[in-house]
Image (cartoon, rainbow, N blue to C red):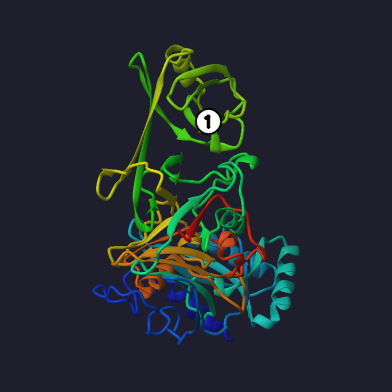
Amino acid sequence: MSRRTLVVGLAMAATLTATAVPGAAAEEETALKFPSTRFPLGARPAPTKTVTAVAQGIDLYDVKAGTSTDGYTVTVLMPSGRDYGMLGTAQAKVAEVEAAGEVASLQKVVRPQVADAPAQEVYMVRVGLWTIKDKAKADKMAKKLKEAGLKVKTDYLGDDGLQTTGPWDVKVMMIDSRTFRGSYAASLGTSVAKRESVSSMAKARGALAAVNGGFFNIHTAKQLRGEPVGASVVSGRLLSEAVPGRSAVVMNGRKARITELGSTVTAISQDGARLPVNGVNRMAGTDELILYTEEYGAKTPANDGSDVVLDANGKVVTLRASGAAVPKGMRVLHGAGVASDWLNEHAWEAWTVKVDTKLTDLRTNRALKLTPDLNVIAGGVGLVRNGQVKITAKLDGHDSMNMILRRHPRTLVGTTRNGSLILATIDGRQPGVTVGANFVEAAQFMRWLGATQAINLDGGGSTAMVVGKKVVNHPSDGRERPVGDALLVLPK
């Protein structure tokens, strides 16, 4: 592998556009079947696949494509800690490498434009190029540069998100709406606050299959990190508020669709006073009013706020100091600061405080009925809308270079024109074995499979697909990671 190969590969960033979708399924086709065209990524190799019938209407495809030709380089980190920067910053790093007695390459990288974020041009500084078998040599160079005072990392080129030959290791589950007789559900495990493995959640519900759900909050207290980031509905109960406009999969019985959601929760005292509820089953910020349900599985914040315990009919059972668990069969309105003052004025013992909850489909502007069959899992990024690639990375909070361009393991969900469901995992971060996908590639892949709507769920080390009692993909952590929620495929 020559240095020129590396430079050309990096220059290919500009070709990753949201309109290049080779082998997309014809929109008029409604039958659910695995595509007969070549694999849509890289040089479009012919994939190999094996198929297993999981249950009536459910087929699992084990797909492999591509070959390993990527190697290693050493990437110099910028003062920000990122592996890229603006031209002047990158040029200064080239000078530092040269002062250490080594030769550096200054390489322009273009993060592709997506539906709601423009293309971004940045620069990377890299030293050397080694085959996949010579990682130890790359590590040796990294050590030398670190000893010279530079911050660097050994980098596998397959992770770049630029030109690659693969390989890819993919699991695809196709659930045919015409013959499937089960149903779909969401699970948060034993509680909202606690993280749990997909296999554990699947076992508890006797699921035929399951994949990990949406992103969970890693920026809260450690014991609360199972909290979903975005809308979560389990059996008709809103357990986490929507991030306005964020993609989600909405499931009702054996029907599933993809849309964007908004939610409003309002506390209404019997004296007519109203106050918006800022969140559901999460930490309270300054002056916020938060609703906690018995599914929360943790104590309310001990922040000198106020707790009002409500029974199922909204009657105020008791007022208490904050920092206690939610009693079984009850809900708690917790107020901090100004919200605490409101509770003290309008939520007296034996009064009634109605909690009005609305979940709205933003595509139709219609309210969703919170019935026991309704389940919702928030997605991370919209990928395909109405049969066309539409990557909403900024709206969904993931418009960084790392998230859009770099390759990672992916968990993907899509629906077809006839209402069938496609679940897929693309394993990654395993040099020489599987490279994962970036957002553009993930969108191309789901269109190839026949999805007319598709979103990205949580990925990375969270990516997991369970069939029966077995994890069928290869999580990049080397083992299954506890996650916030899971999408379950149930036998009835």
Q: Nearer the viewer, residue 329 or 251?
A: 329
Residue visible at 35% across and 59% down in the picture: 118
**Rendering coords of residue 364 (x, y %):** 24, 49
Question: From the viewer's perspective, is residue 434 above or below residue 212?
Answer: below
Identified at 56% across, 63% down, the residue is 464
Residue 240 in sight: no
What is the x, y in percent for residue 230? 45, 46
Query: Could you tell whether 25 is left or right of 69 in the image?
Result: left
In the foreground, 238 or 263: 238
Residue 89, image x and y in percent?
54, 59
Question: In terms of depth relative to the viewer, which is nearer, 120 or 196?
Answer: 196
Q: Which quadrant of the figure has residue 432? A: bottom right
Q: Could you tell me if residue 53 is visible in this image?
A: yes
Neighbor class of circle 1 (other Cα within 10 Å; few <14, some 14-19, many 20+) is few
State the SS at label 1: loop
Quarter of the image where one finds residue 224 = top right
Residue of label 1: 329
- Tag 1: residue type? Gly
